[in-house]
Image (spheres, rainbow, N blue to C red):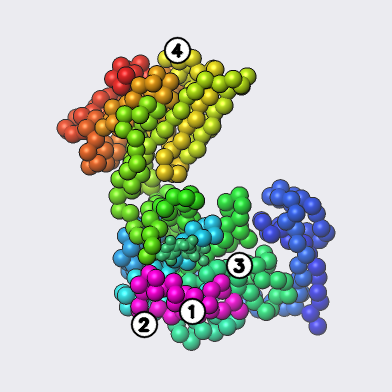
Amino acid sequence: MAKERIIYACQSCGFQSPKWLGKCPDCGEWNTLVEEKIERAPHPRGELVLGTNEAPAPISAITTAEKGRVLSGIGEFDRVLGGGLVPGSVILIGGDPGIGKSTLLLQAFAALSQEGLTCLYVSGEESQRQIKMRAERLGIVSPNLLVLSETSLEKILEQVKKIKPSVLVIDSVQTIFTSSLPSAPGSLSQVRESSGSIIVLAKKSGLSTFLIGHVTKDGSLAGPRTLEHMVDTVLYFEGERGHNFRILRAVKNRFGSTNEIGVFEMKEAGLREVSNPSELFLSERPLRAPGSAVICSIEGTRPILVELQALVSSTFLAVPRRTTIGVDHNRVALLVAVLEKKMGLKLYNQDIFVNVAGGVHVDEPAVDLGIVTAVGSSYEEKAIEPRTVLFGEVGLAGEIRGIAQAEARVKEAGKLGFDRCILPLSNSRQLTHIKTPELSGISSLAECWNIIF
Ligand code: TYD
Ligand code: MG
């Protein structure tokens, strides 16, 4: 007879404790420990491990025999996956509610089914009719795209074994439950157990699987963190409320580069890929307005032009405000100090707000020059020439340091019709073969000021 044991499991990180605690000692979250019943019956673990009884083999003797990647035809989606879908891989997609995860996967599956793959879309959140209504809106008609509305793990596995699809999506892992555990659907052990079974099935049968996961308030994937370790690829689907564009970002990828992003725009008829994001991010830029600078940032392997805005206004507070959206707060504080010391700007009695237009986040040293010039431009009330792009790292002595992938950045600026590029001198020396845009190599902030103001 199975003996029941009660444990308390943190719903955020998976920590287990024999007694209830208000604060999880592992991840520091409050009120996350929930009572869960554990049956000590012999668990069907045999089925849940990946073991194949193989003997160790020399690495040179192992043949990969990798089946080719499958392209969905949605370029942005394939790029984030590292150049197409690897058969047998398991991909976790997280994102805020209503951001468009279901829409994205329905569209991707429609595209994959057009390639002749049998796709199974399992939804624990919507009925078949609801999915059909969405598909109608997206203009999807494909006999290879099968839709199942189900939350029971056992029934899903049964259907998968019967239909033998090539790709599977579980929308979402938090709604799936197994009857072998007494705890409620959505609880940590349920999510871990049911996803675990699906992952094992996927690995064994070479079935590519997408798992959709909800995101908690602090932005991490809800439920077990452990899930991130079990899957091959973790993608986040992000976007700002009130903005139409969405960014698909890889944060872990066993089959490709991370930091790769795909940009989409949410339209009336679903998601449309944006193959030239720079154009989109710069579309509403005010020309000849002080405090606006265009920078070129590298996201993954692609350069993207974004507009950085700064507003400097005198304050009546003892400690002036430094508010930033889309760039690192500490970085801005540091650069403001450099501006005060090296360029003599009196910023100690000024509030400074820095924002990256369009709701994107840029986080690399190359944006430094954009931040200092946007702040300088707002302070001086002088606009930067609108057809100028800037990038470069700013050091504490006010020197401009070289950055990576300068050529790609310069070319992107040229492609979008910019005619001047202000960049670190060390980079411009290596790019003498580029004629347009005109390159102005600088080695100090003072030189930069001479050029733009
Ligand atoms: P959805 O895919 O249901 O989000 P998630 O699965 O991440 O919760 O997307 C829902 C939102 O997308 C909804 O607010 C409406 C919007 N939407 C469109 O603007 N156009 C469309 O064609 C579709 C299908 C959805
Ligand atoms: Mg959904």
Amino acid type at circle 2 is Pro
Q: Please provide the residue range marked out in magenta.
A: 124-152
Q: Residue at 35%, 21% (x, y): give it.
A: 382
Q: Quadrant of residue 250?
A: bottom left
Q: What is the x, y in percent for residue 109?
A: 39, 71
Circle 1 Cα neighbour tier, 10 Å, few/some/many (<14 / 14–19 / ≥20): few
Amino acid type at circle 4 is Gly
Mark sitting earlier along the chain (1/4):
1
Circle 2 Cα neighbour tier, 10 Å, few/some/many (<14 / 14–19 / ≥20): few
Using the image, tell me which numbered label, if any, was put on residue 174: 3
Using the image, tell me which numbered label, if any, was put on residue 81: none
Residue 112 visible in image: no
Furthest toward the top, the residue is 344
Amino acid type at circle 3 is Gln
Mark sitting earlier along the chain (4/2):
2
Task: Say whether residue 93 is left or right of residue 142.
Answer: right
Q: What is the x, y in percent for residue 277?
A: 33, 48
Separation of residues labelled 4 and 2 (CA atoms): 68 Å
Amino acid type at circle 1 is Arg
In front: mark 1 or mark 3?
1
To which residue does mark 1 refer? 129
Relative to 181, residue 276 above or below: above
> Which element is circle 1 on?
helix
To which residue does mark 4 refer? 344
Magenta highlight on residue 271: no
Mark sitting earlier along the chain (1/3):
1
- Residue contact between numbered discs 1 and 3, judged by CB atoms under 8 Å: no
Report the quarter where the N terminus lies.
bottom right
Task: Say whether residue 215 is left or right of residue 25.
Answer: left
To which residue does mark 2 refer? 143
Separation of residues labelled 1 and 4 (CA atoms): 65 Å
